[in-house]
Amino acid sequence: MTHPLDTGDPFGIAQEAASDIARLTGVASHDVAVTLGSGWGRSADLLGETVATVPATEVTGFSKPALDGHVGTIRSIVTPAGRRVLVIGARTHYYEGHGVRRVVHSVRTAAAAGATTMVLTNGAGGIKPEWSPGQPVLISDHINLTGDSPLEGATFIDMTDLYSARLRELARTVDASLDEGVYCQFRGPNYETPAEVQMAKAIGGHICGMSTALEAIAARQAGMEVLGFSLITNLAAGISPTPLSHEEVIEAGRAAEGRISQLLADVIGKI
């Protein structure tokens, strides 16, 4: 069965999805959107009052998540300050092979739903040896190693300050100890080899993962301000003394979820 994003206008389909969200949640427009990656799921419960929770598959263009640890829902939450937050628990990863349009559909939908700020979170491997599993870090920049882009045709978008310096400073008013680093998006789904991790380090990377960069590019194209967080779930291959596993990633997320969920909720509350 052909997916609408395979042949249709991705921006028109995002508008349809935004209309679906408005109809299903009863909320006409949202201010902030957040994509919850591995380990970050509980933060939605701390943001404020949940107005509606919608299965992502009921929204045009969305698919059921392929990965355990992602909840597969879209929630509309109102913060104590009255801000409307769209919480995306349904992320399509590049390694699923569905194409970039489907990877960034959630971001384009969020923009169509009115959000001017996009908060992207993930679980990832850390290259800095002083980092430890369970530590949240800010994303200061990225290196896109997928060989792909959500931009089509002669679409030239400036990527300077893609990850907002203003929002990173705001995050540090919540937790002054937050470190930051450059995120490298690999294609996945295999974890990186030690040699690939050393390559990432040599070209200026500090964090290795399989999401976020393509979404951030689409958010910038849509005119959104972007804040990125990585949960360091493990030290990257060759940095860590033990083999990597998805179970390790999930367990590190569970162990850290209380701290990082409160952190994210407090930061979003200030946006």
Image: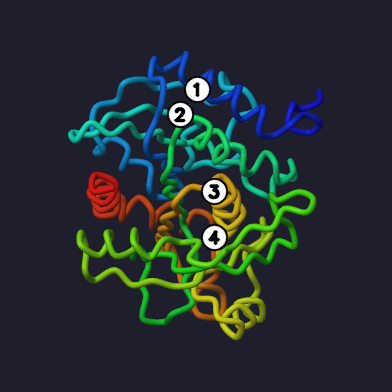
Question: Which structural element holds mark 2?
Answer: strand
Q: Secondary structure at mark 3?
A: helix
The amino acid on which the numbered mark 1 sits, given as a three-letter code, is Pro
Residue 74's disc number: 2
Question: Which residue does the image show at 41% across and 55% down from the upper left?
Answer: 227
Left-right relation of 178 to 188: left
What element does badge 4 sit on? loop
Amino acid type of the residue that numbered disc 2 sits on in the rendered structure: Ile
Mark 2 or mark 4: which comes first in sequence? 2
Query: Disc 2 vs disc 4: Cβ atoms closer than 8 Å?
Result: no
The residue under label 3 is which amino acid type? Ala
Q: CA distance from mark 2 to mark 4?
A: 28 Å
Which of disc 1 and disc 2 is earlier in sequence? Answer: 1
- Three-letter amino acid code of the residue under disc 4: Ser
- Which of label 2 and label 3 is nearer to you? 3
Marks 3, 4: nearer the viewer: 3
> Is residue 258 found left or right of 232 in the rendered image?
left
Task: Kindly identify which residue carries mark 4.
Answer: 245
The residue where tag 3 is placed is 219
Examine the rendered structure and indicate whether residue 213 appears above or below residue 51. below
- Residue 109 in the image: state x and y as whole percent: 55, 33
Q: Give the residue number, with chain letter if any, for mark 1.
A: 55
